[in-house]
Amino acid sequence: MDSERPSKLMTIKDVAERLGVGIPSVRSYRAVAQKNRMNGIQEPADMPKADLYISSIPVWYSMNIELWITNRPGRGRKVDTSEKISS
């Protein structure tokens, strides 16, 4: 039955706290993603569209934010440094 219950709703502030960044950073992630969508582009790092608006405030289901965090490249990403760039 738990799988049928909706996940918690998250505001921009909640997303910022989850990521350990400031609210302006999350607003920037959202603005970049919105611009990309308007231009028909989908980047792996793009923040998902808001699931709902409550009194014009965008909110996301926590499961969608967690999925985005899991799949997005960015801070903390492991990079293979074993390959040398030849000069």
Image (cartoon, grey):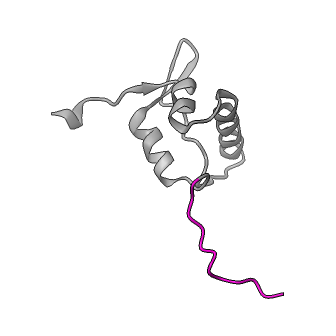
> x%, y% of residue 79?
60, 68
Q: Which of the pair 87/59 is nearer the observer?
A: 87
Up the image or down, 35 lies above or below 51; here it is below
Q: How many marks?
A: 0
Q: Which of the pair 86/48 is nearer the observer?
A: 86
Instruction: State left or right for residue 7 relative to residue 33.
Output: left
Up the image or down, 51 lies above or below 57; here it is below
Up the image or down, 35 lies above or below 44; here it is above
Q: Which residue ends up furthest to the bottom in the rendered image? A: 86
Q: Which residue ends up furthest to the top in the rendered image? A: 55
Residue 24, magenta (yes or no): no
Q: Quadrant of the C terminus?
A: bottom right
Which residue sits at x=59%, y=73%?
80
Instruction: State left or right for residue 18 relative to residue 46.
Output: left
Which residue sits at x=65%, y=30%?
22
> x%, y% of residue 20?
57, 36
Instruction: State left or right for residue 31 relative to residue 47.
Output: right
Q: Which residue ends up furthest to the front in the rendered image? A: 82
Q: Considering the whole magenta stretch, tell me its main secondary structure.
A: loop
* Residue 30: quadrant of the picture: top right
> x%, y% of residue 10?
47, 26
Q: Quadrant of the N terminus?
A: top left
Q: Which residue ends up furthest to the left in the rendered image? A: 1
Residue 77, magenta (yes or no): yes
* Residue 86: quadrant of the picture: bottom right
Which residue sits at x=54%, y=38%?
19
Which residue sits at x=65%, y=82%?
83
> x%, y% of residue 9?
42, 25
Up the image or down, 30 lies above or below 39; here it is above
The magenta-colored residue range is 76-87
